[in-house]
Amino acid sequence: MTSDIRYALRMIARNRLFAAVIVCVLGIGIGANTAIFSVVDALLLRPLPFPGANRLAFVWETSPRSTTRIGPSGPNYLDYKEQSGSFESMAALELGSGTVTGFGEPQQVPALRVTTNYLRVLGINPALGRDFNESEAWRDRVVIISYGFWERNLGRAADAIGRRLMIDDLQYTVIGVTPRTFWSPLPSELLVPWGDGDLRARSRTGHDFGVIGRLTPDATPDQAAVELTGIERRIATIAPQMRDWAVTVVPLRRLVAENLGASAMVLLGAVGVVLVVACANIASLLLARATSCERDIAVRRALGANRRHLAQQFLAESLALSLLGGIAGLLLAMWGTDILDNVLPQTLPVTDGGVIVRPPILLDGIVASFTACVSIATGLAFGLTPALASGRTDLTASLKESRSTHGQTRWRSLLIVTEISLALVLVICAVLTVESFWRLAHVDPGFAPDRLLALEMELPTDARYTDAVQQRTFFSRVLERAGSLPGVQRAALATILPLDPTLAHGQTFDIPNAPALSPGEPPRSAARRSVTPDYFQTMGIPLRSGRTFTDADREGRPYVTIIDDTFVRSYFERANPVGQRLRIGRTDLEIIGTVGAVKQNALDRAPLPTMYLSMRQVPEPLMSLVVRTAADPVAMIPTVKRAVYAIDPDQPVYRIRTMEQALHDITSPQRVTLILLTLFAATALLLASIGIYGLIAFVVARRTREIGIRIALGAARQQVLRLVIGEALGVTLAGLVAGVALAMIASRILASILYGVDVREPIVFLGTAAGIAMVAALASYLPARRATAINPLVALRTE
């Protein structure tokens, strides 16, 4: 083997251009595989950065009348914690943000209010300072900050512990800094403590907390869910509203991959196919070179070399080439993973609302091991074909002046059939993905996104803006000032804007005089938004019937609401809802109008039934300001921010974006999948075309004497052209038949990530196959044309 490796390295050095082509092709194939595998590794394989991470799980409640997962209340969490034997520890958390001042422009920083054992449940110790004490609560005004916050705002000062921060206009003392490598499952840079007494005082039916727990070593999520559901049954005896509710336990690892794992696996399969096509192409090249050297191989066999020695020599060379390609691929993947880490969204949507932070995409030991395994497997894959073919060389025929090339042609044809079939699979998948994205891009979001600028604000309600009057006054002043700015055509406020999966405000209600709900029927519910009178005109949401809000719909006046088309279809069927009433708790609201439905969470999901309330009647501390500008909305950002700071210089403005950017962001996972899948398909098709060209050029070169004889005997140029192209199309047809069968299987797998596309659409399969046949004909035309130019006299003198 040592001798074979030295011989392989000499052959690579002697044929540097040939080797460079193979290493480049392999580097691209292996690098792309490594980069995509790093995404799969981050989402599906790599252990999360917590001790015993496989035992961490989130806990949700589910209504007997709905499959939607919602968070438990504070009292319910405490009951779970005290009575459960399946969890060795459990923590509650509440997602929010904090207004931080004192570091230049005010900041709105993502934050979590957590029970004091939160970091201990995760198995994390602060890098600096200490963790919360069990007796600490929100009133103690202590905070643990993230490493990024410490680095960005405090310059990694060693004396940061004990420093005071102004958060929501209250002084908090920094007691700890999380480690640099700490991955928070939920967006947060600040942690403040909840005490058990604070949680016990919350409403039993609030459903406003997230719960994460660490299972005991012998407990499974399903067993824990059954146990907690039993606790829920006991809770129902003191809270009848919770009757027949259940509990769902979802492992943290599964939650990470819930909405992006399928796309990552599809891409990994696609890029694997590209690598197989590349291997087939390289095997074809090596087979051609082996054919040109078959007399040399025959001499070696005649001198005593057996088939094992020859095969070992070919495999040594192919493994050396593949390892060089693996090194090139690893270098390429280092660049590719950085691009993917920046392109893919930093947070992933969670089913039923909310987000989870995406783990970082890294080139770690697992990914490097994958690259090494792929390199070795690739070397074996493309080295076996010439190795096997060389072992079947006919010594007598090879040592003669004339010899048959039927065996070598058959091997190369089989490789090209493989390339074409796999290229067809990828191209069909790419075409289906393009159609899906085109349909998604043309979905009507329900509003006009052009020239719309959105800015989010959350008022600090701990020390200031503590009541509805103060909140209403602040937002009214902001709206008045923003609406009067030059270049602003309209301005409005809303609690949640369209296409925002991070927030979900739901509202249950009754319809007086409507038939009672049947047993097992889910309660009537809808998404709830508080908006100002000009919201619908500013957003471009059409009014269907009735009227919109006016300044008269304010505090002290009868409550009114506007509902959307989905709400009407869900709860009023054909009846006219305007003038009818809804009841929330003990409060009646009159329906004064209906408007068009708006996509709330994603373009590929049906609009939720939505009710709109007047912000002047139901103010909230978190509102988004949206302005429609006369020109480029991005140019208006500094002006609008100054308008807010003029009302309160300590009020941060964050999540600044245009609604066109929001549309772009909501489709970014599909866009990344489309771009990569199309790139892989184009690469596979190019490699297959090169393979067809190489095969026909090989056939023409090996059959020069035969073609010369045909021409000498009177064959017309067109007959020779048809003969050569026909051979190429025969191979292509075999590949297309196999490819269509494989594509039918692959398209069904792809269907899970497509929108509005029939994966069995015949025109896609037939059109793609016809297109590849045309590409194959073009790839074979040049060597076929060269065959027609063969001079019979020269051909008959040439071996």
Image (tube, grey):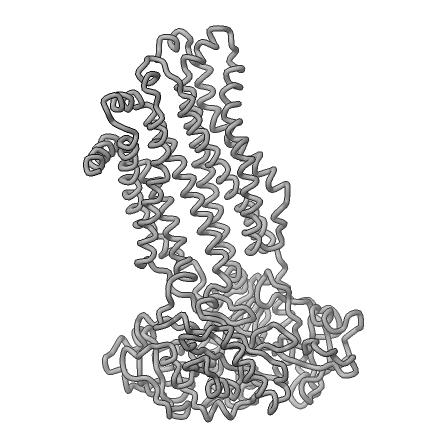
Q: Residue 477, can we see it?
A: no
Residue situated in front as seen by the camera: 654 or 294 = 294
Quadrant of image for the N terminus: top left
At 46% from the left and 79% from the top, the residue drawn is 86
At 74% from the left and 78% from the top, the residue drawn is 518
Q: Position of residue 182 (x, y in %)?
A: 34, 72
Depicted 230 relative to depicted 496: above or below: below
Residue situated in front as seen by the camera: 487 or 118 = 118
Q: Position of residue 155 (x, y in %)?
A: 27, 75
Q: Quadrant of residue 521?
A: bottom right
Residue situated in front as seen by the camera: 221 or 585 = 221
Say whether residue 159 is left or right of residue 643. Answer: left
At 32% from the left and 19% from the top, the residue drawn is 395
At 35% from the left and 44% from the top, the residue drawn is 377
Depicted 487 relative to depicted 176: above or below: above
Q: Quadrant of residue 541?
A: bottom right
Q: Position of residue 77 (x, y in %)?
A: 50, 85
Depicted 273 relative to depicted 715: above or below: below
Q: Position of residue 465 (x, y in %)?
A: 50, 88
